[in-house]
Image (cartoon, grey):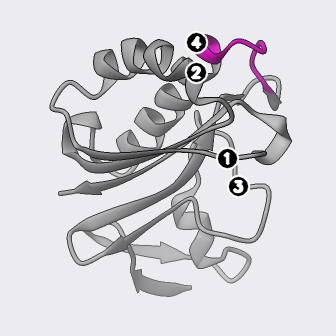
Amino acid sequence: MWLIFSNRKEAVEISNNETVNDLFKTHKAPKAIWPYSKAYFAWDFLFCSWQLGFDWDTMEIVEWWIENQTKQACRNISYLLEENWLSLKDVVKTTIFMKDLNDFEKVNNIYKNYFILKPARSTVEVSRLPKDALIEIEVIAMR
């Protein structure tokens, strides 16, 4: 057994068959499918890796509409924050990657209902996203 002062507020014990990344498991948000941390605390900031409109139950991208994928990505961010004792109100910066900026207004109409405190934000159009998703959102939160 190891006692690790992780990204959580208290020390956490892990067994020999666990890894430090196991501390960031979430039960609702999709697991990381490539070699990176889903979230990482540095000082009082939680850096959350990108979230797609990926459904945990099916392990697939939700229906191919920007509105559905945006809602699911925001829910996944919320789940990830919740499991690290934070909420969407703690988000200080978001970055949105979109396949088509023509969907900007549709995304904004959904985004404003999740990020009501209006954190700083960047939005960029990209040629392609993992799993051919239409949107990807990453956040930085502060405790």
- The x and y percentages for residue 40 are 44, 69
Q: Residues within 10 Å of mark 1 (few under 14, many from 20)?
A: some
| Cα–Cα gap, marks 1 and 2 | 12 Å
| Cα–Cα gap, marks 4 and 1 | 18 Å
Q: Is residue 61 visible?
A: yes
- The x and y percentages for residue 88 are 28, 35
Along the polypeptide, which appears first: circle 3 or circle 1? Answer: 3
In this rendering, position of residue 76 left or right of residue 94? right
State yes or no: discs 2 and 4 in contact (Cβ < 8 Å).
Answer: no
Q: What element does badge 1 sit on?
A: loop
Along the polypeptide, which appears first: circle 4 or circle 1? Answer: 4
Magenta span includes 130: no
- For mark 4, what is the residue? 67
| Cα–Cα gap, marks 2 and 3 | 29 Å
Q: Quadrant of residue 100?
A: top right
Q: Quadrant of residue 6?
A: bottom left
Along the polypeptide, which appears first: circle 3 or circle 4? Answer: 3
| Cα–Cα gap, marks 3 and 4 | 23 Å
Task: Give the label on residue 126, or none.
Answer: 1
Residue located at (52% from left, 65% from top): 23
Amino acid beneath label 3 = Ala
Q: What element does badge 3 sit on?
A: loop
State yes or no: discs 3 and 1 in contact (Cβ < 8 Å).
Answer: no
Amino acid beneath label 2 = Asn
**Numbered range of the magenta stretch:** 61-68
State yes or no: discs 2 and 3 in contact (Cβ < 8 Å).
Answer: no
Along the polypeptide, which appears first: circle 2 or circle 4? Answer: 4
State yes or no: discs 3 and 4 in contact (Cβ < 8 Å).
Answer: no
Q: Is residue 72 visible?
A: no
- For mark 3, what is the residue? 32
Up-down: is 77 above or below 39? above
Residue located at (67% from left, 74% from top): 18
